[in-house]
């Protein structure tokens, strides 16, 4: 009986977790899971990252993908989730431009190269419950690639930060993925993305958006402080 209970608990835990294996651009999905999105090492376990200073926070020690997705500047993007994203917390998107002479299919995204293009904030619904965009859906909230993003090859990174246990240090859970993309039509390269940060490096375990008691912001959701740099909107 104890063994059966353990199996049931393990199965429940996996069902509560998720990965993001497919990027969707202007309504068109990758042809298959992990096609241009790099397959993360938690693809089977679906476990989140709890220490935001760990090297896994960048792309979750993922294997390089075989393909590259073409993404027009100004496009709408989101990711398909393997399970329902049922935990409360923000979804954030980052870009990192591949340096000259490197290949998007092998570059690891190291250094102060990442800039944030989107984040989500909570609100209180008609039942006076605090909810987040994309909560209880099988996809992440949509975001736009800024129209003035310079043309070129990039890593696109999505993360959902589950905050249901975040009142304890290193108990927020990060679910994330990185995709290999080529941005085109970016306004002649007129944009200057920033601020640029490193991953790991942009987050600390004690950041107010990572170590947070959701009960304290229930009545004032606009006071939530997303971790990381300011959003660059182009």
Image (cartoon, rainbow, N blue to C red):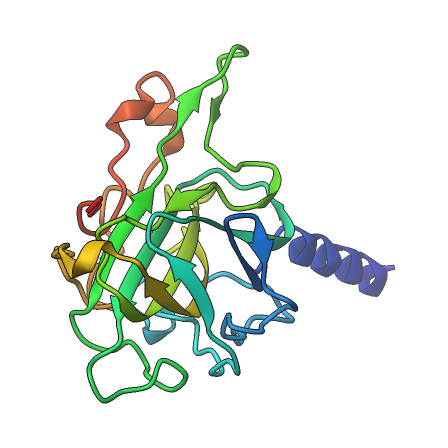
Q: Is residue 146 above or below residue 212?
A: below
> Taking 44 as reference, is 58 left or right?
left
Q: How many numbered tags mark residues here?
A: 0
Q: Quadrant of residue 82?
A: bottom right
Q: Residue 65: horizontal and vertical position, in percent?
A: 50, 80
Outermost residue to the right: 1
> Taking 210 as reference, is 188 left or right?
left
Residue at 78 percent of width and 62 percent of height: 7
Q: Is residue 233 visible?
A: yes
Q: Is residue 50 visible?
A: no
- In the rendered image, the quadrant that contains the N terminus is bottom right
Q: Quadrant of residue 8?
A: bottom right
Q: Residue 63: horizontal and vertical position, in percent?
A: 49, 82
Q: Is residue 38 above or below residue 220?
A: below
Q: Residue 191: horizontal and vertical position, in percent?
A: 15, 54
Residue at 44 percent of width and 50 percent of height: 160
Residue at 20 percent of width and 47 percent of height: 232
Outermost residue to the top: 126
Residue at 18 percent of width and 59 percent of height: 188
Q: Nearer the viewer, residue 56 or 150?
A: 150
> Taking 178 as reference, is 153 left or right?
left
Q: Nearer the viewer, residue 204 or 79?
A: 79
């Amino acid at each position: 009986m104890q063994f059966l209970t353990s199996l049931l608990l393990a199965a429940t835990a996996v069902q509560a977790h998720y990965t993001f294996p497919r990027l969707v651009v202007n309504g068109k999905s990758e042809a298959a899971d992990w096609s241009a999105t790099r397959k993360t090492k938690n693809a089977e376990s679906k476990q989140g990252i709890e220490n935001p200073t760990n090297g896994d926070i960048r792309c979750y020690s993922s294997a390089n993908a075989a393909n590259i997705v073409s993404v027009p500047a100004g496009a709408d993007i989101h990711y398909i989730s393997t399970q329902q994203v049922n935990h409360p917390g923000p979804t954030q998107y980052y870009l990192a431009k591949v340096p000259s002479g490197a290949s998007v299919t092998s570059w690891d995204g190291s250094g102060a190269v990442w800039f944030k293009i989107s984040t989500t904030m909570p609100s209180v619904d008609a039942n006076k419950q605090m909810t987040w965009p994309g909560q209880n859906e099988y996809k992440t909230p949509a975001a736009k690639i800024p129209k003035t993003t310079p043309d070129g090859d990039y890593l696109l990174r999505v993360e959902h930060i589950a905050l249901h246990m975040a009142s304890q240090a290193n108990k927020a859970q990060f679910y994330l993925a990185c995709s290999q993309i080529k941005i085109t039509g970016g306004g002649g390269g007129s944009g200057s993305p920033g601020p640029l940060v490193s991953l790991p490096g942009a987050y600390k375990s004690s950041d107010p958006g990572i170590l947070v008691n959701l009960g304290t912001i229930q009545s004032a959701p606009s006071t939530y402080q997303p971790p990381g740099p300011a959003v660059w909107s182009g």
